[in-house]
Amino acid sequence: MNSDAFDWVSSHADRTPDKTALVNTATGTERTYEEFDRRASRFAEVLTEQLEIDVGSRVAILSRNSTEYFEVLYGCAKADATYVALNWRLAPPELEYIIDDADPSILLYDPEFADTVETLRGDIGVDQFIALPDPVEGDQPEPSTDDGLSYETVLSQTAGTRREMPDHDRTDTWGLLYTSGTTGRPKGVKQTFDMVLYNYLNIGLPIDLTSEDTTLNVLPFFHTGGLNLYTNPTLIAGGTALVQPEFDPGAALDILEERATVFFGVPAIYRALFDHASFEQRDLGAVRSWASGGAPMPVSLIETYAERDITIQQGFGMTETGPTVFLIDEANAVEKAGSVGQPSPFVNIDIVDADGNSVETGETGELLVRGPGVTPGYWENPEAQEDAFSGQWLHTGDVAKQDEGGYVYIVDRLKNMFISGGENVYPAEIEAILHDHKAIAEAAVVGIPDEEWGQVGKAFVVVEDEPSLTTEAVKAYCDEQLASYKVPKTVELVEELPRNAAGKVERETLKSRAE
């Protein structure tokens, strides 16, 4: 295992010190690579000199997106500390579990979450609290606790000596990102330096990311998508990352029209942009690369954007994979809509049956992934490690198939599948059909018990523009598009789908409501 010192931010600070690295789109705060490197160095000095943390100590951050967020992350790298990205959408008891699991010695927070910090303070073993500037207003708050510190104050008290990332193995842990816990308690996924570097290669090469690019990031930094699609790759390339603290479709469209050259979003983001009143009037021709992941992009939405000469490349990844595993090439993004493409350059995949044998082309099986961009494992969780890995292969839990051209299609999550009359039914297939209906905004299908068939589907449908749409009309539409055993036996029209803090549909909630 190689031991190296490498610090791309310091390198860019030497070569292009005046180039803009980070921009907070809400406050207008801009940091050049020189400023970014110096402030990250100052935070590293705070950790090692003022707070005297040990190598490998955890530093948690509870904040919306900001330029300071990346100063903290890169300061941790320079100080040989491990960041812990906390999901600010979680309730205090959920945060308490993660904080207890990661055992950080320091917690940074922005003013919006001061009350949450006060609620947690007596129940967590954190030694020091640091109040960050407001990422929306830009104000520096007073610390919310008697023994708390102010971020700008502690930075101002440092000598300001420039630091580079120390020698370390490239597979050393840089940070912990916690899974959403849809199948149990959240797991802390170790994010290594190799994962960040190889994700840059796996996504940067396919979209030709360079130092000339400006990316707009609207995804939260507590997820791998927010950190690594494309903020970290942009910083590695020496480009400019525009950071939106909270997604606003109108403001995002302004930036996409005026400044950004590449963009990554989840399907809900693309839907919100398209639904904005000014979308049709926007000139978005300066954005040369559009990509999506996090959930299946409805084919109809891909085709709708294509009518505006916007080609959205669908991808696939996981927290455990850095995240990039696939990104369909632009030339086939519309023609093969529904596919996530071929494996990225530094990824190996296999699709296997229940016995672990590779399936034939066109057959479905579980997707396995391996490569230098895959996590070495979970924080203090050997049981999860054993369940998820077979040697170097990561079991994704996703059902996939591959066509003759090597293009992969994600069929569904393995745990979402149900069996009706002896036939495997994948809710994602039914949901894709429902999403193609012009009057349906969202849909989710779950399997529920049935005396005759064992299990049958129930669809929960959010109606968009047609208040007269009936449940029978939805079933009739499905009957025209699907085999009879896939057609939901019942349909319920709802105002919204229940989602967890990560924005994923809570299928267990729907099942309990249906049974």
Image (spheres, grey):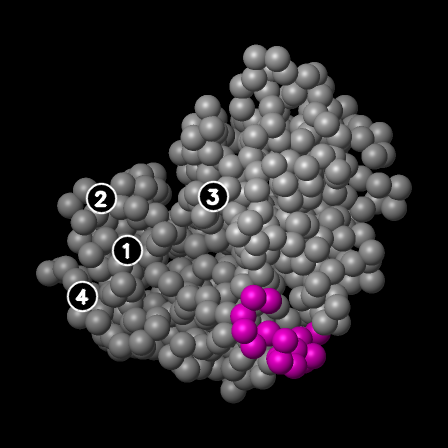
How far apart marks 3 and 1 lie (CA) works out to 39 Å
Discs 2, 1 touching: Cβ within 8 Å: yes
Q: Which residue is mark 2?
A: 124
Residues at marks 3 and 2, CA–CA distance in whole angstroms: 39 Å
What secondary structure characterizes most of the magenta part? Answer: loop
Q: Bin the neighbour count of mark 4 within 10 Å (Cα to Cα): few under 14, some 14-19, many 20 and up.
A: some
The stretch drawn in magenta includes residue 313: no
For label 1, count other residues whose C-alpha is less than 10 Å away and answer few (under 14), some (14-19) or many (20+). many
Residue 115 pos. (x, y %): 20, 56
Image depth: mark 4 or mark 3 in front: 3
Circle 4 residue: 143
- Is 186 above or below relative to 217? above
Q: In this picture, is 296 found above or below 74?
A: above
- Res. 494 mark: 3
208 vs 41, left or right, is right
Viewer-proximal residue, 177 or 331? 331
Amino acid type shown at disc 2 = Ile
Label 1 belongs to which residue? Answer: 107
Measure the C-alpha gap from mark 4 to mark 1.
12 Å
